[in-house]
Image (spheres, rainbow, N blue to C red):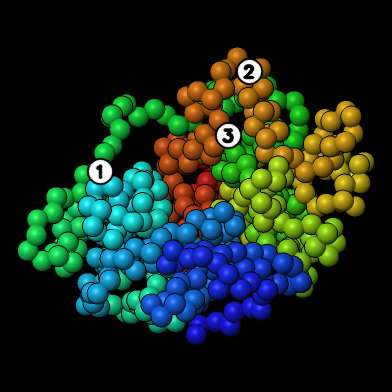
Amino acid sequence: MAETIPKTDFAPTEVKLPVATVVEIPVVEHGNVKSIPMIFCAMDDGEVLPVVDAFAYARARSVTHSPVSVDKDVSTLSRLANFIAVALTGRRMDDEDQDYLVYAYLATRASGTKVFSSSDPISELDWKPIGTMTLRREYSAIVRYFEFCSKSFGRAELGRSWSMAGDSHALSRMKEFRRLREGDFFAHLSAARLRWHDIRSPGTSYRPLIVRRGQSTKKMRTFPPTEEIWAIINAERNPAYRALWVTAAFGGLRISEQLNTWSCDILPGAYRSYFFPEFREQELLERVFLRAHPITSTYTGVVGSRSVSRRSFLQATYGLIPRCDLSGKDPLRAGWKGTIVSGEHDTHQVFWANSRARRMFEECHDEIADFHDIERTSLRHPYLIVNMSDRSGSRRGEPMKISAVQSAFERACVRAGLEPRRFGRNLHGMRHYYKWLLRNELGLSEEHVQICLGHASIESQESYGRSSRSAYDALAGRGG
C-alpha cells in the first residue's frame, strides 16, 4: 500500500457501487478537517477496496489546487476505472499496449456510449458525448495521475488489478500524445481507437472516431484594445476596484488570485531580495507584490519567520479557512490555479508590464492601506481587497465577493461608454490582454511570458531564479 488511509467513520460496505465510485473522506491536517475524494472499487469477489494510489494523488494535489479541480480529476479516474472493468472483462492486455486502453476511454467519452450495441457491456456506462476541451482536460488528469504515481511508487494502479509500470513505453507515449495539436490529437485518437478494437475484437470492422466540431467562425479578439483598457481603469474611482483592474491588465493576475492577497503581500522593494535572492537589495526599490500561495505559503506578515502555513495561521488567528478551500456555493470563495511558487515561503511576484500602471497601483494601495488602518480590519481578517464603499456598514471592510467584482467591472465599462460582456470586455479578458501585451507589444520570449504569467515549471530553484531575473530585466524600459 502506498499510504496509510486515515481513520474515518465511513463504512464502504454501506455504499452501493457500480464498480468504482468516489466518496469524500474527512482528513485532519494541521488541526484542520478537509475532504479528500477517494475511489472505492468492488472486486470480483464482492470485496470493496480503496484505490490507495488515487487517494495519495488527490491528497497531494489538494495542497496546490482547489477542491473542485481535485474532484474533477478523481471523477475522471473513477470513470476510467469503470471503463477498464467492462472493457477488460475476460481479457488481458500486454503491458506495452496499455495506453491504448486510455485512448479507447477517450474515444468512448468523445462519442458517448449510444454508438455501442446493447449487447456490449460498454453501453451500460450510459455516457453522453463530451466536448473537445473536456476531453483534453480529462486526458491531462489521467497523465498527471500516472506521472505522479510513477515518480512516487514506480507504478500506477487503477481499477481491478490493473497497473502500469512507471518506466513503460506506454506511459512515454501518453506523455507525447498529450503534447499534440488538436488536429493531430484527434487523428491519433482515431487511429488508436482502431488499434484498440483490433486488440479487443480481432477480425471485425470498426469505424474511425468522428469528432463533431462547431461551425468555423472568424476568431474574435478575447480582450479589449489598449485604449479601452485604460478607459475602464480611468472610469473607476474606487481604489480597491481600480487596483484590481490595473493588476489584471498590467500585472497578469487573475481576479481570484488578487482576492486571495493579504495586506502584508505588498512590501517595500528592499524586501524583494529576501524572497528572491537573485534580486540585489540596493536596486529595484519599487514595491514588491507577492503572489503567496494561500494554503502553503509560510509568509504570514513577519519577514524572517516561517513557522506556520497560511492555512494554519488563518485558523489559529481568525478561525477562517483559505478562500480557495471554501465550497463552490460560498459567495466568498476565490479559487487558486496552480501558480508557480519558489523559495522557502512559496511565493512568486507580480511582473509589471507598464510602469504607469505600477505607479497607479501603488497610489491605490496607499488609499487601501489607510482604509485598513482606520477600519482596523486586521482584527477580523488579513485580506487586502475589501469592500470600501458599503455605507450600511454590514460589509464595510469585509473581503470582497467575486460577484461584487463582476458587477463593479460592468459598471466601469458602462461609465467608460462601453458595452460589457462583448468583444472581450470581461474580467478574464484583462489577463488575456496582459499575455498579448508581453508577446506582441513588448516582444518577450515565450519563457519570459510563462514566468510572468506564473505558468513555468521549476527545474531547479537556481535556474528559476535566473529566468525570473532575466524576465524582470527584459521588461525594464519596455513597459512605458
Q: Which mark is residue 414?
A: 2
Q: Is residue 365 visible?
A: no
**Viewer-nearest of discs 3 and 1:** 1
Instruction: Say whether residue 249 is left or right of residue 86.
Output: right
Reading the image, the residue beneath label 3 is 427
Give residue 223's position: percent from left, percent from top: 48, 31
Reading the image, the residue beneath label 1 is 211
Q: Mark 3 or mark 1: which comes first in sequence?
A: 1
Q: Which residue extends farthest bottom?
A: 1
Instruction: Say whether residue 190 is left or right of residue 342.
Output: left
SS at circle 1: loop
Asked if 352 appears above or below 77 in the picture, the reply is above
SS at circle 3: helix
Q: Give the amino acid type for the residue marked by disc 3 in the picture.
A: Leu
Q: CA distance from mark 2 to mark 1?
A: 40 Å
Give residue 67's position: percent from left, percent from top: 59, 57
Mark 1 residue crowding within 10 angstroms, few (<14) / some (14–19) / many (20+): some
Q: Give the amino acid type for the residue marked by disc 2 in the picture.
A: Val
Give residue 345's position: percent from left, percent from top: 67, 66
Q: Which residue extends farthest left?
A: 203
